[in-house]
Image (cartoon, rainbow, N blue to C red):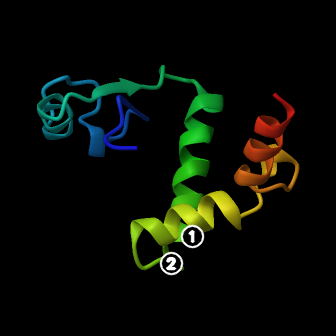
Amino acid sequence: HGKPREILTDNGSAFGLRSKHSKFDRGCRRRGIKHIRTAIHSPTTTGKIERFFQTLARELKFCVDHHEFRMRYNHFRPHTSLHGKVPAEVYFSLRHMS
């Protein structure tokens, strides 16, 4: 928990395009967060970012606070890359196996 060590973004204008002196980059540096941009013409990585923000926007509509969001995201929301399972289900079943 706590602040992220790194943030992966696309190269959009909201993130200062390719400049390392954007307001977003300065904010990251002040907080000790490394800003990583996707490589140009990397649709797979960019798609992951877009999909995450789509999920985030949809799920935040149901949440009042961070605790509620974490609970919904990790314990109730089926995840396509986990074959319809929720993250907690996969995490805890793996922990019991070790």
Element on which disc 1 rests = helix
Q: Residue at x 61, y 50 (%)?
A: 51
Q: Position of residue 29 (x, y in %)?
A: 16, 28
| Residue highlighted by disc 2 | 61
Element on which disc 2 rests = loop
| Residue highlighted by disc 1 | 58
Q: Residue at x 55, y 35 (%)?
A: 46
Q: Position of residue 56 (x, y in %)?
A: 52, 60
Tell me the kind of residue under disc 1. Arg
- Horizontal side, residue 33 vs residue 11: left or right: left
Which residue is outermost to the top? 39
Number of on-image labels: 2
- Horizontal side, residue 34 vs residue 61: left or right: left
Vertical position of residue 73 compared to residue 58: above or below: above
- The answer to whether the residues at label 2 and label 1 have Cβ atoms under 8 Å apart is yes
Vertical position of residue 92 compared to residue 33: above or below: below
Q: Nearer the viewer, residue 18 or 4?
A: 4
Q: Residues within 10 Å of mark 1 (few under 14, many from 20)?
A: few
- Horizontal side, residue 88 vs residue 54: left or right: right
Q: Quadrant of residue 30?
A: top left
- Horizontal side, residue 40 vs residue 77: left or right: left
Tell me the kind of residue under disc 2. Lys
Q: Residue at x 20, y 28 (%)?
A: 32
Quadrant of image for the C terminus: top right
Q: Which label number is shown at residue 17? A: none
Q: Residues within 10 Å of mark 2 (few under 14, many from 20)?
A: few
Q: Position of residue 18 (x, y in %)?
A: 28, 24
Q: Nearer the viewer, residue 98 or 84?
A: 98
Q: Position of residue 36 (x, y in %)?
A: 37, 24
